[in-house]
Image: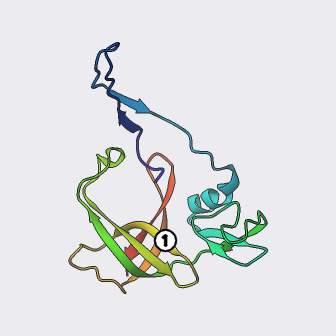
Amino acid sequence: MLRHGPLEVALTLSSEDSLPSRRTLSLRFNIPISKTKEFWAALREGKLITTKCSSCGKVTFPPQADCPNCMSSAHEWVDLGTDAVLVTFTNVQITPTSFVNHDPYIVGIGRLADGPNVLAWVEGATVEQLRPGDRLRLQARVSPEGNPYYVFVRT
């Protein structure tokens, strides 16, 4: 997700001609979104949209500039919907470096009523409370840094 701090990569050199280093290398980068900027703009406004291929009708999420089914670049933006059913989930106890400032969290796959499966954090429930088949609602959010993202909330 775009809402978290810089990616940290540990770089260790090992060669007879170099000295080993255990320094952390922090990288900051911009992720190009020019082909999906409509999605990010809508998400920032609290709306959830995605692409639908104008040639074959396939709805894809995350939005795709080119249809993975027929490879057409002709698409339209459609409402994604917010109602979903939990397909599966996992509790992430050991977080990756980019999420080091976050407590353990739940990630789930929800099948939207009108189409594709979506992978997102699940909020509003504990691991013990969740069961496949639970109803979820997909919600748009904006991080304190101003980056849009989305989560599932158990309903």
Please determine whether, in this image, residue 8 is positioned above or below residue 155.
above
Please state if 150 lies on the left or on the right of 55 as rendered: left
Q: Farthest residue in the front direction?
A: 16
Residue at left offset 40%, top offset 31%:
26
Image-quadrant location for residue 13: top left
Please determine whether, in this image, residue 73 is positioned above or below residue 124.
above
- The quadrant the C terminus occupies is bottom left
Residue at left offset 49%, top offset 59%:
149
Residue type of the residue flagged with mark 1: Val
Give percent across and percent down for residue 56.
75, 77
Residue at left offset 45%, top offset 52%:
143
Q: Farthest residue in the top direction?
A: 17
The residue tagged 1 is: 118
Give percent across and percent down for residue 31.
57, 44
Image-quadrant location for residue 60: bottom right
Please state if 64 lies on the left or on the right of 19 as rendered: right
Please state if 24 lies on the left or on the right of 143 as rendered: left
Please determine whether, in this image, residue 134 is positioned above or below residue 116.
below
